[in-house]
Amino acid sequence: MLELYECVVRLPSQCYKKPALLIVNHTNPEECGRPEKAHQVLTNKATGFLNCPLSDHIREVDNYSIQWYKGCEPIVKDDPLWNRFSYVNNSVTELLREEAVIPEDHAFYTCTMTFNLEGLSGRISETINGMVDVQYCLEPKVVEPANEIIKADLGSSFSKMCRVFVPSVGNKCCTDLNWKASNNSISKIVSERIFQESQREWREEEEKGVWLERHLNFLMVEEEDFYINYTCLVSSDRGISLAFFILQPTDPNYLLPIGVLLTSLVLVFTVSVVIYHRFKIDIVLSLRRMFPLLYTNTDSDGKLYDAYVAYPRLFGDGGGACGEAEMFALHMLPQVLEGRCGYRLFILGRDSLPGEAIVDAVEESMLASRRLLLVYSGSTFCSGSHSDSSSGVLEAWQSFERQTAMHRALLEGSLKVVLVELEEVSPTQLTLFPESVRHLRERQGAVCWWKSSRGLRCGRWGEEEEVEEKRGELASSPLSSPSLSLSSRFWKELRYYMPVRGTRTR
């Protein structure tokens, strides 16, 4: 039933009219709610809102209260049975909020307002047909970027994907991805240095949702690209989501240069060690010659001789070995070490006083010497029977000389002994050597006069090298022969173990 009412207000100078249409709807006693219904849609599995249609009346009353009904059942606040429902007042309208909408929420909802207006109380209601749409599209979830810092090499190419999952059923989703750099849109033209590709989407499973992707590409990263927020903006009917990453230059790669440096150092060290061991004697002799100030002058140490020379004496028909050793000790050593190198040697019988006791001469001369040169051959220490008493005296003399030297070298440590080996010693001959000599030879080696064509090692002092001199008759070697040359390996090695003739004072 429709009735038209008109309100007229007459003033002395004006007249006001306002018509009002009164519609009277007949209610059905068997139904809850009003006969005329508004239609509003809820989305399945999403959070939905129903808008109370009484907004125009709410603004005109003095005060009011709202009660919502689902069908005929009142929706009670803070009731566990209605925990998915809540009242929302945003000062403009009244809303009913529904969490995780389900198909059973398809029902009639009534919004009833109880009010006061100028002292009068009243109640008014409107009913909503709340329909549930089973095809839904929820709020997008940004998987990447993850608000992170990503590092890239300057001048390299770089790509980053914006990946979004939209929980949905059906084809109602309308979601758009867009890359921005500091709130500025990025070109979609592939010829640009920085561009975003076309948006791709696919449905993983019908009941789950849609995956969306959009790549951001840098053909070449430049300095100006660093420390900028690159944001993936996701727009949908459920709102706007965003995620970003910041591009930074990669940390300097110190691993490679450190590796190269360490490898170079190891290589240099290895080469240096090899060179030092191969040319140690030459290097040391050169340093002594060029920088004498680095070495202390030994003239003030109380020693008279640089070396005491002990050698096997020739007695009876002792053979050529002892004769060669005597020739070497009495002629060749003085020619080179004294005549050409300036060393002072003590040779018993040559430098001792006439009539001086041998024991005293040996002990005093060794105390006054900085080194002891023990010259021997393979047959030097081979004992044998001697027919005359002079041979026994000489052998005892040599034994005392050797024992005194070994005592001072091995026990006291007051004298450095240099073993000078004139000929190759066979294992059989070596077993006949005194134990002290064998021990000293094994510990420090010997300076070898002989060298085979293969360049053998001679104890620990010898070095593997090409033969620099040929073995020959010692007595027939002239001063100008290669065996007497200071550049030969033997004389270099012997000079290496002789005392240093420095100029620096203590």
Image (cartoon, grey):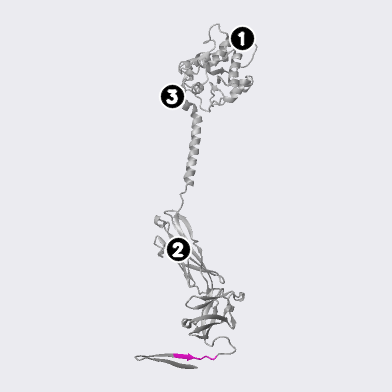
Looking at the image, do the residues carrying marks 3 and 1 touch, with CB atoms under 8 Å apart? no
The residue closer to the viewer here, 487 or 301, is 301
Q: Amino acid at mark 1?
A: Val
Residue occupied by mark 3: 293
Q: What kind of element bears circle 3?
A: helix
Q: Which residues are magenta?
A: 20-26
Where does the image place residue 479, in percent across and percent down from the top left? 46, 16
Q: Name the front one of labels 3 and 1.
A: 3
| Residue 35, quarter of picture | bottom right
Mark 1 surroundings: few (<14), some (14-19) or many (≥20) residues within 10 A = few
182 sits left or right of 31 in the view: left
> Is residue 380 visible to us here?
no
In this view, the residue in front, 454 or 326, is: 326
- Residue at 48%, 46% in the rendered image: 256
Q: Is residue 309 above or below residue 197?
A: above
* Residue kind at label 2, given as amino acid type: Thr
- Residue positioned most to the right: 385
Look at mark 2 in the image and give the residue it sits on: 231
Q: Position of residue 214 (x, y in %)?
A: 47, 65
Q: How far is disc 1 from disc 2 in space, using C-alphas?
A: 107 Å
* Above or below, 209 relative to 465: below
Seen at 55% across and 17% down, the residue is 375
Q: Return the disc, 3 or 2, that comes first in the chain's sequence.
A: 2
| Mark linked to residue 393 | 1
Residue 160 visible within the image: yes
In the rendered structure, does residue 228 fall within the stretch colored magenta? no
> What secondary structure is found at the residue carrying circle 2?
strand
Measure the C-alpha gap from mark 3 to mark 2: 73 Å
